[in-house]
Amino acid sequence: MASTTLTGPQWADTTVLSGDLAVAASELRAKWRGELQGHGSGNLVRWLFHHRLVDEITLITYPVVVGQGTRCFPETGPDTALALVDSGPPRTG
């Protein structure tokens, strides 16, 4: 989790990243075995993509539109080659 205000998360296995986020995220990736997840922040995901700190993305969309919406991927910046691995309706149970 990246935060400018939170210091003591209440969730198990949570690390709060602060300061130089690029350095902190790189260090966490280097020492952590397994999957690192970031939920809910489009700004954070775009920032991580821009700094090439994302290896894989699972994008779940819901058919709800409010206002004009926000682009998931910016129109400018470095190109990112993505490969579709799977698609379909949500899995249940």
Image (cartoon, rainbow, N blue to C red):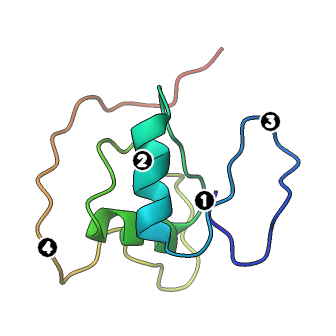
- Position in image of residue 90 (x %, y %): 51, 30
Q: Pointer 2: what residue?
A: 59
Q: Position of residue 42 (x, y in %)?
A: 49, 68
Callout 1: SS: loop
Q: Residue 12 got which mark?
A: 3
Mark in the foreground, 1 or 2: 1
- Amino acid beneath label 2: Leu
Horizontal side of residue 4 vs 36, given as left or right: right
Which disc number belongs to residue 78?
Answer: 4
Question: Viewer-proximal residue, 25 or 84?
Answer: 25
Task: State the separation of the CA atoms marked 2 and 3.
Answer: 24 Å
On the image, the x and y values in percent for residue 56 come to 32, 41
Q: Is residue 85 visible?
A: yes
Q: Give the spatial CA distance, label 1 vs label 4.
A: 22 Å
In the displayed structure, 31 sits above or below 16; it is above
Q: Residue at x 41, y 67 (%)?
A: 22
The answer to which of marks 2 and 4 sits earlier in the sequence is 2
> Which residue bears the numbered disc 1?
40
Q: Nearer the viewer, mark 4 or mark 3?
A: 3
Q: Quadrant of residue 75?
A: bottom left
Q: Position of residue 25 (x, y in %)?
A: 46, 57
Amino acid at dot 3 = Ala
Name the one closer to the observer, 93 or 35: 35
- Residue beneath the point at 45% across and 31% down: 89
Upstream in sequence: badge 2 or badge 3? 3
